[in-house]
Image (spheres, grey):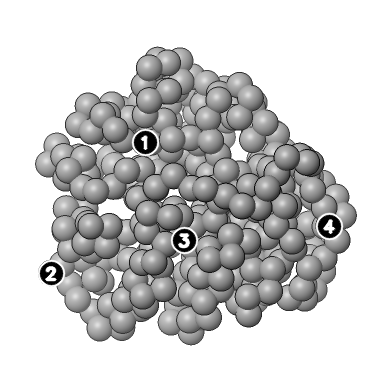
Amino acid sequence: MKRYFALILINIFVLAGCSNATEGPGPMIIIKPDPKDNPTVTSPIIKGICIFAGQADSFTDADWQALANSPLTDFVIIPKDASTYGSNEAGYKSQLGTFMIKVINQLVSRKNTAKIWIGTPGISSLNYNIASSNLDPIYNYLSYVRDQIGSTTWNSNIGGVYLNMEAVYGTVDYGNLTSNSCIKLMSELSTKIHNNLNTKFLWIPYYGYGSDPAEIIKRIGYVANRSTIFDYVVIQPHYYFDGSIATNLTGVKYCVSKQSVSYRDGLEVTPKLSKTIIGAEMELDWHIVPPNNYTDQLTRYNNYVDNFAEFKGIYPIIFYWDGTVQNALSGRINPFFQ
């Protein structure tokens, strides 16, 4: 989702040490077995938007009001890289926590039905070594935000926690998933979010592209289909930014319609045993935010509309965007949801 890193991230570390993947199911591994899990799911309506820290910093009162006046129900607040906050608990609380509380207040004061997803400090292929040591710092930051905003706002206006990590980095052993530090962090943080914070957990990974797309998809599939880590997994197709991977739209559409992470040909990565709800990310940037109307980007965006509009009100749809927020809302986002 951090598009300015996208080209760098494609081939750096993400597949480090991985074995060659095949587009078929591997060993059946469940991180936290639950015999009550049922693959039949019912999703609340999520009409969402991602708001990056850098974007929120520049919003005017009119921008916040435009967000409140929109048909959007959910707002995913995405922090900067963990290093921006010192990669430690003190920085997460004093810097990121203060920022997050201000954003929550801006939205709730204007839209009392808003559901806000509190983002964790950013972990990427460039810093995923911190995953093994960041469980307590991240959880304590989340607890700090909860305590500062109070139980009424927390219970009424917090949709949940967003994991700001767009892929599973490092080596993955499909016979022992939590030997991977990223998946271990996901799993342990999930337990604390569900049991202690009593809220939901969201992940928005990117679908396969780059040198080994099948392996990237496989990792998402094992986390989403075989574990109870996430309540929602909303998948980035990335096709808007790379017209050569149109099959990603088809693949993500299979994932949502089947409610099971699948490869581009529709084959499930591994049988779906979890209740994880699968959604799709709509993607656009300044090229098609009015008054801009670039032909290639508009064509690709319209392909998203054609593929994902049928899921509105059924499964989660969350927008990635950049440009001028009021124009992005009035020109693209609001019309999609209305």
Amino acid beneath label 4: Met
SS of the residue under disc 1: strand
Q: Quick check: 86 above or below 75?
A: above
Residue drawn at (23%, 33%) of the image: 111
Query: Viewer-proximal residue, 9 or 244?
Result: 244
For marks 2 and 3, the one nearer the N-term is 3
Residue 320: % across, % down: 37, 58
CB within 8 Å, label 4 to label 2 = no
For marks 3 and 4, the one nearer the N-term is 4
Q: Using the numbered discs, state the Cα–Cα distance from disc 2 to disc 1 in whole angstroms.
A: 30 Å
For marks 1 and 4, the one nearer the N-term is 4
Residue 117: % across, % down: 43, 38
**Camera-nearest label, 2 or 1:** 1
**Camera-nearest label, 2 or 3:** 3
Q: Using the numbered discs, state the Cα–Cα distance from disc 2 to disc 3 in whole angstroms.
A: 26 Å
Residue 9: % across, % down: 56, 63
Q: Using the numbered discs, state the Cα–Cα distance from disc 1 to disc 4 in whole angstroms.
A: 35 Å
The label on residue 28 is 4
257 sits left or right of 131 in the view:
left
Residue denoted by label 1: 115
Dot 1 alpha-carbon crowd within 10 angstroms: few under 14, some 14 to 19, many 20 or more:
many
Residue denoted by label 2: 291
Query: Viewer-proximal residue, 169 or 249?
Result: 249
Residue denoted by label 3: 280
Amino acid beneath label 1: Lys
Camera sees residue 213: no
Residue drawn at (31%, 35%) of the image: 114
SS of the residue under disc 2: loop
SS of the residue under disc 3: strand
Query: Viewer-proximal residue, 253 or 204?
Result: 253
